[in-house]
């Protein structure tokens, strides 16, 4: 903004002159949300308020050195994981959780962010985990790759599909297709052999989004996300006439689905992980093992797990994970008999009752998509009531909370919680593309905000 204003005083002067029209536009777009009576009032209020994270976590650099020509002419845009707690710039898993309002309302900025991931993509296809860390100056030029390598490219493919579905612009798809294709191929070859598609990389290196704990071999959460990634990638390939790659994606899908359903199904949920080579197994119930199911459904696909097993798994999560944290959400892990893990468990490294706040929203949406609309909506409400009312964090959202007390454990100002903006579409029974079509809530918010 220093390219537009000489000082904060210049901003104040503009506000003084244009205050009335700016206020009118703000009230207009907020009124669209507040008048959406099909949504509960807590959700309407929260959709408005959690957008306060946008100016707080946004970092928009001018097209000047050390940035290269890839940032010209509009600069480089990225989001800060947690300005006060973990000031990473361009953290791609956080974007997966929280970039939807940018896709909806500022697609040019979402594209600018993707251009950075494309530019810094490693030669082998790996997408960056992050683009840099804030020090005395914003840093967009020191990317990292290995941490969470199992899912970084999954997020990259997903984020491109969001932008393509939002804009309907094939030029966008063509610009990034070769890059995401290379990234997808790298991910699917991180571990060779049957079931490798749903497995941790060779040596179980790099962790996944649940980055503290133990992950070995085939994993339900990671595996489901990879299956959703392949659905997305296959559609892109077919749309652009790349039938050979679409067939390759199908081969990976067939292998991954076979391994998921034959090797990880435990009767009423999917095993947390199973490494056949060593025989090591985690039979703990992972509360968010169906993230890939929601991802596929939100992107317009039928799903990636067997429908009857999805319903059975959700009942197990109710009985186990939600049972031990009923007022807050779902503990990330629980024992199959519905008891908490012991504190010394490697799997429960974040804490026995800990949960990721944005993940509770994804789980709630999965219940809704599986026919339990009232239950899923109430799960989301309980999570949000704890954050906003009991813990008093309406604008300072944590990354993780304790399910037994509701208290923050990790994170301040986490934009991951803007995942909430996916909930209206799910409640309406529509996918991402339809959620921003003409006449949609998103479209009406944009139109109202432009009126002067």
Image (cartoon, rainbow, N blue to C red):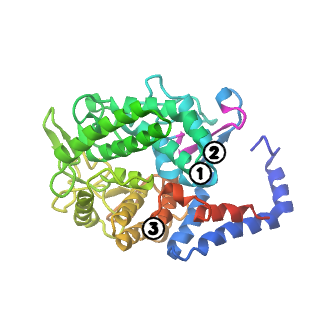
Residue 273 percent across, percent down from the top left: 22, 44
Q: Residue at x 31, y 69 (%)?
A: 326
Q: Name the residue under label 2.
A: 109
Q: Mark 3 points at which residue?
A: 427
- Looking at the rendered structure, the secondary structure element under dot 3 is helix
- Looking at the rendered structure, the secondary structure element under dot 2 is helix
Quarter holding the C terminus?
A: bottom right
Q: Is the Cβ of the residue at disc 2 closer than 8 Å to that at disc 3? A: no
When asked about the image quadrant of residue 197, the answer is top left
Q: Residues within 10 Å of mark 3 (few under 14, many from 20)?
A: some
Q: Is the Cβ of the residue at disc 1 closer than 8 Å to that at disc 2? A: yes
In the displayed image of the protein, which residue is found farthest to the left? 279
Quarter holding the N terminus?
A: top right
Say which of 196 and 416 sits in front.
Answer: 196
Q: Which of marks 2 and 3 is nearer the N terminus?
A: 2
| Separation of marks 2 and 3 at Cα, in angstroms | 27 Å
Q: Name the residue under label 1.
A: 102
């Amino acid at each position: 903004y220093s390219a537009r204003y000489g000082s904060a005083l210049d901003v104040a002067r503009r506000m003084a002159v244009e205050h009335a029209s700016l206020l009118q536009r703000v009230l207009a777009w907020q009124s669209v949300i507040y008048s959406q009576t099909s949504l509960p009032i807590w959700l309407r209020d929260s959709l408005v308020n959690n957008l306060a994270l946008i100016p707080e976590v946004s970092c928009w650099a001018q097209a000047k050195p050390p940035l290269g020509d890839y940032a010209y002419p509009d600069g480089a845009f990225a989001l800060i994981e947690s300005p006060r707690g973990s000031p990473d710039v361009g953290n791609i898993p956080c974007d997966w959780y929280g970039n939807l309002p940018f896709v909806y309302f500022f697609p040019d900025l979402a594209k600018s962010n993707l251009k950075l991931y494309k530019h810094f993509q490693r030669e082998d296809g790996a997408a960056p985990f992050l683009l840099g860390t804030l020090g005395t100056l914003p840093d967009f030029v020191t990317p990292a790759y290995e941490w969470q390598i199992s899912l970084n490219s999954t997020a990259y493919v997903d984020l491109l599909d969001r932008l393509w579905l939002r804009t309907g612009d094939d030029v966008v798809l063509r610009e990034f297709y070769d890059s995401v294709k290379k990234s997808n191929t790298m991910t699917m070859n991180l571990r060779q052999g049957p079931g490798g598609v749903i497995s941790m990389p060779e040596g179980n290196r790099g962790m996944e989004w649940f980055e503290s704990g133990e992950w070995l071999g085939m994993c339900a959460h990671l595996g489901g996300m990879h299956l959703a990634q392949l659905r997305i990638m296959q559609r892109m390939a077919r749309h652009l006439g790349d039938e050979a790659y679409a067939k390759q994606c199908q081969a990976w899908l067939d292998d991954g689905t076979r391994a998921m359903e034959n090797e990880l199904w435990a009767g009423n949920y999917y095993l947390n992980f199973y490494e056949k080579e060593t025989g090591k197994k985690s039979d703990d119930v992972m509360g968010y093992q169906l993230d890939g199911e929601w991802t596929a459904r939100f992107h317009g696909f039928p799903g990636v797990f067997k429908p009857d097993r999805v319903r059975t798994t959700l009942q197990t999560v109710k009985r186990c994970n939600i049972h031990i944290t009923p007022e807050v959400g779902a503990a990330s892990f629980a024992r199959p008999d519905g008891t908490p893990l012991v504190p010394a468990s490697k799997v429960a490294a974040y804490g026995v009752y800990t949960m990721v706040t944005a993940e509770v929203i994804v789980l709630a949406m999965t219940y809704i998509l599986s026919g339990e609309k009232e239950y899923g909506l109430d799960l989301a409400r309980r999570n949000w009531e704890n954050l906003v009312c009991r813990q008093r964090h309406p604008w300072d959202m944590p990354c993780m909370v304790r399910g037994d007390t509701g208290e923050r454990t990790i994170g301040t100002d986490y934009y991951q919680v803007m995942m909430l903006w996916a909930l209206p579409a799910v409640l309406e029974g529509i996918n991402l593309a339809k959620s921003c079509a003409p006449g949609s809530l998103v479209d009406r918010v944009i139109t109202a905000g432009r009126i002067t």
